[in-house]
Image (tube, rainbow, N blue to C red):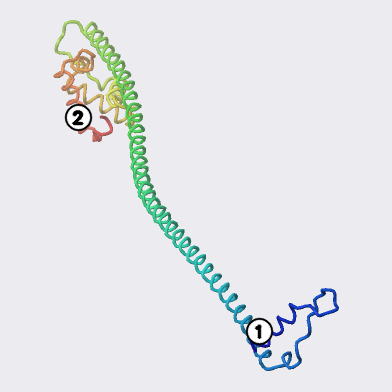
């Protein structure tokens, strides 16, 4: 076969005579064109081309697979890193939420305590206001009672002076309060209204005034009710009122 190829090359390189140097390439012999060796070469060439193409395709597929694998690995690593970072952020958020809940519970407890303290302070303020009002009322009542006691003492003194003048120098004569029921009732009303308006009826106030005057006399009663009365004088009047309440069947709480 090599000799045939060499003959073909030599014939192609030498110009035919009478052609003015023009090159004429003769057709290969029909025996070579359709011979088994040429067919085998063509088959081998086609197979080689197919193999080369397959190799190129496989190489491209392999490179693409490697690239896809690297891309997938990179994406997986990035996804894992993002998931880890997200998990860390979630954990931090949960820790912050737990701390916030603790702070909220503490604030609510403090708020409840402050509310209770405020309510107690308001109650104390209301009680203090009420106590101040009661104290002011008691002071006003005491001032009125003192004025009334002084008035009563002055009236008793005037009455004693009048009686003494009318009776002359006879010391044995004693004033009988039962002969002056209006005076006895007035005295009983004043004695039973020292802390508040009297709650006794006319008969009870008359009995009270009569019993006290008969017990200690007008003079002792007047000195005990005066603003400058000593402790013993005031005590004598109080004890006389207590005894009179018993004798008149009056509850002491209705007087004092």
Residue underneath mark 1: 46
Q: How many marks?
A: 2
Seen from the viewer's position, the closer of residues 122 and 184 is: 122
Q: Earlier in the sequence, mark 2 or mark 1?
A: 1
Q: Nearer the viewer, residue 159 or 225?
A: 225
Left or right of 110? Residue 225 is: left
Where residue 161 appears, x then y in whole percent? 24, 8
Q: Quadrant of the C terminus?
A: top left
Residue 113, percent across and down? 33, 42
Could you tell me residue 209's position as x and y percent? Answer: 26, 24
Query: Is 96 drawn above or below residue 69 in the view shown?
Result: above
Q: CA distance from mark 2 to mark 1?
A: 147 Å
Confirm or deny contact between disc 2 and disc 1 (CB under 8 A). Answer: no
Q: Which residue is found at the position 36% from the left and 33% from the top?
A: 126
Vertical placement of residue 248 versus 178, above or below = below
| In-front residue for pair 62/122 | 62
Marks 2, 1: nearer the viewer: 1
Going 50% across and 63% down the picture, which residue do you hit?
A: 75
**Left or right position of 243 against 207:** left
73 in relation to 245, above or below:
below
Compared across the picture, whether 112 is left or right of 32 comes to left
Q: Whole-percent x and y of residue 25?
A: 78, 80
Crowding near the residue tagged with mark 2, few <14, some 14–19, many ≥20 C-alpha atoms within 10 Å: some
Quarter where residue 38 is shown? bottom right
Q: Which residue is mark 2?
A: 242
Residue that appears at 16% across and 8% down: 170
- Farthest residue to the front: give it: 17
């Amino acid at each position: 076969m090599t000799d045939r190829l060499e003959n073909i090359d030599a014939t192609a390189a030498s110009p035919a005579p009478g052609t003015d140097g023009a090159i004429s390439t003769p057709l290969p012999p029909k025996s070579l064109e359709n011979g088994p060796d040429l067919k085998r070469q063509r088959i081998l060439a086609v197979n080689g081309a197919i193999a080369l193409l397959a190799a190129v395709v496989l190489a491209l597929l392999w490179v693409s697979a490697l690239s896809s694998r690297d891309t997938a690995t990179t994406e997986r690593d990035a996804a894992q890193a993002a998931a880890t970072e997200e998990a860390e952020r979630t954990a931090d958020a949960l820790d912050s939420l737990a701390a916030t809940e603790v702070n909220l519970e503490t604030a609510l407890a403090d708020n409840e305590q402050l509310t209770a303290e405020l309510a107690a302070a308001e109650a104390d303020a209301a009680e203090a206001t009420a106590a101040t009002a009661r104290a002011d009322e008691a002071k006003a009542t005491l001032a009125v009672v003192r004025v009334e006691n002084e008035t009563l003492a002055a009236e008793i003194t005037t009455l004693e002076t009048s009686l003494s003048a009318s009776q002359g120098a006879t010391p044995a004569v004693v004033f009988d309060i039962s002969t002056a029921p209006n005076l006895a009732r007035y005295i009983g009303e004043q004695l039973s209204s020292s802390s508040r308006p009297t709650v006794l009826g006319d008969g009870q106030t008359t009995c009270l005034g009569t019993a006290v005057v008969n017990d200690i006399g007008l003079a002792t009663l007047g000195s005990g009710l005066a603003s400058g009365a000593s402790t013993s004088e005031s005590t004598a009047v109080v004890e006389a009122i207590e005894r009179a309440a018993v004798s008149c069947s009056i509850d002491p709480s209705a007087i004092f």
